[in-house]
Amino acid sequence: MAGASSDGVVAESVRWETLDDDRRLATPRTWAFVGTVVALLVAFLYDYVVLPERRATFAWWDVSLLDWLFLLALVVFAFYVVVPLAQNPRMTRYYWRQLRTDRLATASFVYVCLFFLAGLFGPVIAPPVEEYMLARDGAYGGMSSLQPPVGFTTSAFATSNCVGAVTNDVCHGTWLHPLGTTGAGRDVALLILRGSRVALQIALITSMLVVPLATIVGTVAAYFGGRVDEALMRYVDVQQAIPPFFVYLVARTMYHVELALMILIFGLLNWGGVARLVRSEALQKRDAQFVQAARNAGCSRLAIVRRHIIPNVSSTVLTAVTLQVPTLIIVETTLSFLKLGPLTAYRSWGYVIQTAMFNDYFPTWLWWQSGATVLVLVLTTVSFNVLGDALRDVLDPRVEGVND
């Protein structure tokens, strides 16, 4: 099996003990994953086929198509990211030690974790949009608008019921609303928190689509070659010639476009480039000595692809996806900013920026609404890019044997 030599160089080799077990391709984790997906599918069919159209799925939650896709993406993330790391604590500690050597990558990892938690639990913590209206002493009877962020001030005549201190006709920001409020009295921090759910949905659902499609197409094309490679790569060429943006505009014109449809369009039409990168990496691994050894030992093609090719291209896939996810987040934010987004775009960061910049109060006031949202958007995209570059070096499958 793979291991590290005395001089620290990692050597590639084969897990010989698995060669005589090619038929056991489904592990307990795989069966548990399939069972969970089947349960989700049954619940989805019950929601869309059995229940009346206008009846909520649950008394407390009407599950939409986007919610079902998000739940599926969370299941995939749990079974194929969280569970493997939990089952292999020694390797997880090794990854963490490697990541900590880069302070910028560590900071990006911490931010991405906070972004994940904010997107997952933000809508639970933050009240609905209609409940953002503020009033003095926490009552909703009046409206407090244009509250400045902490450390800044605005004219007391430009706002009503200033929540912070008022000195010399100047309203001071307060920690009750650390990023200030909108012109309608909505808390900017809570709006950003709710918008993080949209960004997280884009990140997880897109990854759920791109990773398996690009990995399977790229590795199969590289390993089998010939007509299989030619057919798959020509399909990728045709797909990449179709602009997802124009497909989305056509769908938006013809149908009732939801955020789920937008994510599906951009996700299903953006994996071709990643597949080409995977194919290029898999071509190098196909002729490697450890693959040749597995082939000569009688390992089946499917087992070679699953156990030896795919693990060795995982870092390429991860890096490519972490670079693509922030791009799609920016695309959705831009469409929402231009009012071309889905009807659910009011929860997006693009909507928050747009409502501030196209307001009569901007830029004298409300600069904090767009400025804070843009800052969060920049931090999110930069963190994904930095973390992706760092994980390319950390998640090297050739060091898999250090825990054996």
Image: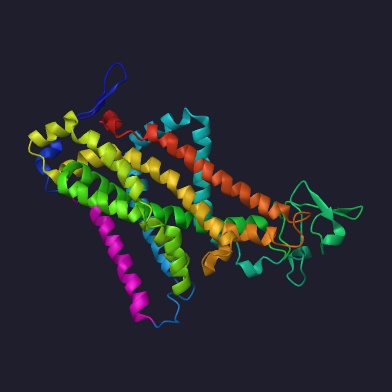
- Residue range corresponding to the magenta coloring: 25-51
Colour scheme of the picture: rainbow
* 377 vs 54: above or below: above
Is 30 magenta? The answer is yes
23 and 347: which is toward the camera: 347
Specify the quadrant of the image occupied by residue 351: bottom right
**Residue 76 x, y percent position in the rendering:** 34, 54
The answer to whether residue 154 of the structure is visible from this angle is: yes
**Residue 176 x, y percent position in the rendering:** 72, 55
**Residue 324 x, y percent position in the rendering:** 43, 47
Is 335 magenta? The answer is no
318 and 354: which is toward the camera: 354
**Residue 309 x, y percent position in the rendering:** 23, 39
Q: Residue at x 39, y 35 (%)?
A: 392
Taking the image as shown, residue 346 lies to the left or right of residue 147, namely: left
Q: Quadrant of the N terminus?
A: top left
Taking the image as shown, residue 363 lies to the left or right of residue 111, namely: right
85 and 339: which is toward the camera: 339
* 233 vs 38: above or below: above
